[in-house]
């Protein structure tokens, strides 16, 4: 009964954590979090099969379910999520997805079709005693892929920490939890643990995955902290304070005001918006992490397209790269009026960009502007210049009269600087 109680509690914990993680992950659709949701669901199904087996006895169907979800899908999804988190190139992430997906397809066919031999009881069955050598080799390959991926990603993150990568220490804590979870899953499914230790280890693995993933969820308290100051802005005369907020009037005697960086998630209270007539602008200077420019540019292109299609009050919304500075991006935004600023801030695509761009940004500065004078071209492009219409001057035709003694015919007098009247 102890085995049943432990397995049941672990099943409820794994499935509950999976449902909660899915509910908080779907709005952002981050690949590493979705992969770890698959890990938690797989562990929940494995623990559920263990609960039934400990209570009523194991069977070939329960063994297939445990091996399929616990030995194959759970460790592969765990490793895939780690690669998605640590990998900074599209090629590395795509290769991991391709290998994991193709391997799962082949392994599922083998595990489901290979015959199972032997008898079962209420003790946890071992793969070697019921499967042939081929399914065992397939599961061994999945475990090797998971362990190698976890160790490699931990090593890469450790190297980045030594190179003063600002995101690496925070990522290392999550990787430590996830790597320990992978060790527990592999050790349990390879029958290194027996009795109540097996479901207890899988339940602990599910808890580690949940806590590790929760550190990366948007909306955590540390997400509201200000990023580190922009390193190169000391060369410029703009009045930035040490808190990396742009202050208006600090050096000119005016009233000060602090501006929240636009890439941070909006606070619970509505952001202050300007009042009064006129247009309002915003300049945001981003310093990207090494290797994150491609992902950031894709997110910037998506939010710019959404702004262009759904925000008539946003007059200008552009992202600029900086010559000779590959990791710098400058956003320039111009709004029709104060209401357009408020509507832009509340748009779902703007808030989604704020959440998804944060892992790729090392620092930022925001400058709020009020437009005093200027010119903005219409959306359809420059209009053709209008040529001035000049009425042609009609010179009166005078036929000369030839008379010996007559006075010559008077010609019209044109004063300099005036058009003659016809």
Image: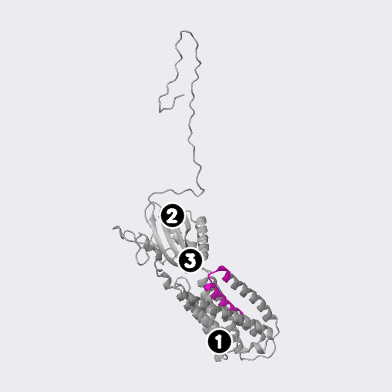
Q: Which residue is mark 3?
A: 357
Q: How far from the left and from the top, in percent, is residue 391?
A: 48, 30
**CA neighbours of label 2 inside 10 A, class few (<14), some (14 to 19), many (20+):** many
Q: Nearer the viewer, residue 340 or 330?
A: 330
What range of the chain is rendered magenta? 72-92
Query: In what element is the residue under mark 2?
Result: strand
Q: Is residue 89 magenta?
A: yes
- Label of residue 246 in the image: none
Task: Please name the residue shown 46% across and 74% down the image.
Answer: 163
Query: In what element is the residue under mark 3?
Result: helix
Q: Are marks 1 and 3 in contact (CB under 8 Å)?
A: no
Depicted 104 relative to depicted 285: above or below: below
**From mark 3 to mark 2, how far is it between C-alphas?**
21 Å
- Tell me which numbered mark, 3 or 2, is placed earlier along the sequence: 2
Task: Please name the residue shown 67% across and 85% down the image.
Answer: 60
Q: Which residue is mark 1?
A: 199
Q: Are marks 2 and 1 in contact (CB under 8 Å)?
A: no
Q: Is residue 214 magenta?
A: no
Q: How far from the left and from the top, in percent, is residue 47?
A: 57, 84
- Tell me which numbered mark, 1 or 3, is placed earlier along the sequence: 1
Depicted 172 relative to depicted 234: above or below: below
**CA neighbours of label 1 inside 10 A, class few (<14), some (14 to 19), many (20+):** many
**From mark 2 to mark 1, how far is it between C-alphas?**
57 Å
- Tell me which numbered mark, 2 or 1, is placed earlier along the sequence: 1
Q: Residue furthest front?
A: 324
- Label of residue 334 in the image: 2
């Amino acid at each position: 009964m102890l085995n049943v109680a432990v397995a049941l509690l672990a099943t409820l914990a794994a499935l509950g954590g999976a449902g909660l993680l899915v509910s908080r992950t779907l709005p952002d659709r981050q690949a590493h979090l979705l992969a770890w949701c698959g890990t938690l669901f797989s562990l929940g199904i494995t623990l559920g099969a263990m609960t039934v087996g400990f209570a009523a006895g194991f069977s070939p169907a329960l063994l297939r379910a445990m091996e399929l979800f616990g030995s194959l899908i759970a460790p592969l999804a765990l490793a895939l999520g780690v690669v998605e988190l640590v990998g900074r190139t599209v090629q590395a992430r795509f290769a991991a997805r391709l290998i994991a997906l193709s391997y799962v397809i082949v392994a599922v066919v083998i595990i489901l079709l290979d015959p199972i031999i032997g008898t079962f009881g209420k003790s946890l069955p071992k793969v070697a005693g019921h499967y042939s050598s081929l399914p065992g080799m397939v599961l061994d390959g999945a475990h090797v892929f998971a362990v190698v991926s976890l160790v490699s990603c931990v090593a890469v993150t450790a190297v980045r920490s030594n190179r003063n990568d600002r995101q690496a220490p925070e990522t290392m804590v999550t990787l430590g939890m996830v790597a320990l979870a992978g060790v527990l899953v592999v050790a349990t499914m390879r029958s290194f643990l027996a009795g109540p230790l097996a479901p207890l280890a899988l339940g602990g693995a599910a808890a580690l995955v949940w806590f590790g993933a929760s550190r990366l969820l948007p909306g955590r308290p540390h997400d509201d902290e200000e990023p580190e100051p922009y390193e190169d802005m000391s060369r410029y005369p703009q009045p930035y304070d040490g808190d990396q907020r742009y202050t208006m009037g600090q050096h000119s005697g005016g009233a000060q005001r602090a501006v929240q960086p636009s890439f941070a998630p909006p606070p619970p209270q509505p952001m202050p918006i300007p009042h009064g007539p006129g247009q309002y602008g915003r300049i945001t200077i981003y310093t990207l992490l090494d290797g994150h420019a491609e992902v950031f540019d894709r997110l910037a292109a998506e939010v710019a397209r959404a702004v262009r299609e759904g925000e008539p009050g946003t007059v200008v919304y552009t992202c600029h790269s900086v010559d000779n500075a590959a990791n710098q991006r400058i956003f320039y935004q111009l709004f029709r009026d104060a209401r357009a600023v408020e509507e832009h801030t509340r748009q779902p695509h703007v808030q989604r960009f704020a959440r998804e761009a944060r892992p790729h940004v090392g620092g930022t500065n925001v400058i709020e502007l009020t437009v005093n004078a200027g010119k903005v071209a219409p959306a359809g492009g420059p209009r053709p210049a209008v040529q001035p219409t000049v009425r042609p001057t009609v010179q009166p035709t005078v036929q000369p009269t030839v008379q010996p003694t007559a006075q010559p015919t008077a010609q019209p007098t044109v004063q300099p600087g005036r058009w003659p009247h016809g």
